[in-house]
Amino acid sequence: MRRAFDLTSAVLLLAANPKAEGFIKAVRKFQSAVSVSTDLAEVRRSVEELQAMRDDVGDRSHLARALLTHAVVVYCRASHAKAIERYDVGVIGAYSPEQREAHKLIVNLRNKVIAHFGPGENWNDERVLYLEQEHGDGITAVHYRTNSDSQVSDSLESLLDIAIPYVKSKESERAAEIDAELSRTPELFDVISRMPFNVEKFYDGVPGGAENFWGPKGFTAERTVKSTIRSD
């Protein structure tokens, strides 16, 4: 029999149960690690696309700007230590002093150029001009905006090389914490068993989603801890 149970929903039902406190924390910590890992994987894809076009942006400057914006914003979201809905995974703690400086530059770019408009280091240059010419005097404006920067892409690539495997290791550690809590308080299965997860509904409209969920190469395979054994 193949069944899946929604631990995220079970946490909501168990919120008032003091015996479930450790389990609730463990689930939320694991979910945070997986969420951050997913963000970092998305950043990796954008950086790879930027690196592929770095010597020949051509008429794809708008795409390059969109990829850079996505990479910087999502990276900062993933590495933020004070997220509203996620536990801190501690990405920055895995960096060397030099990498922490690179991280600060990326965050500064997000805060002072991308998310909140500012000139940055030659990123945006806007001027209001007064013209005098034979066609008549006038007021106009010019602007220059950098679409992408290979140094930023290189910095992100270097940071991701450390951050992604670090967060993957946290996934495993935090999955083990859930496993330990379920072993310590098996009565929680009474609630968990009432929270089935509908794989087909969740992946409705996603080609191959439900079919690829199960099995040794399924979505959860690399994140599964198998020491808790329960059959009924």
Image (spheres, helix red, strand yellow):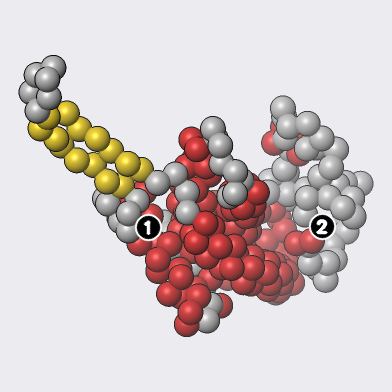
Is residue 42 visible in the rendered structure shown here? no
Report whether 100 appears left or right of 200: left
The residue tagged with tag 1: helix, strand or loop? helix
Is residue 210 visible in the rendered structure shown here? yes
Q: Residue at x 56, y 62 (%)?
A: 154
Report whether 205 appears left or right of 217: left
Q: Is residue 14 above or below residue 98?
A: above
Q: Is residue 173 above or below residue 219?
A: below
Q: Nearer the viewer, residue 200 or 119?
A: 119
Amino acid marked by disc 1: Leu
The disc at residue 221 is 2
Identify the image quadrant of residue 199.
top right
Q: Nearer the viewer, residue 137 or 165?
A: 137
Residue 21 % position (x, y): 54, 68
Q: Which residue is mark 1?
A: 109
Amino acid marked by disc 2: Ala
Label 2 neighbour load within 10 Å: few <14, some 14-19, many 20+ = few
Report whether 61 appears left or right of 82: right
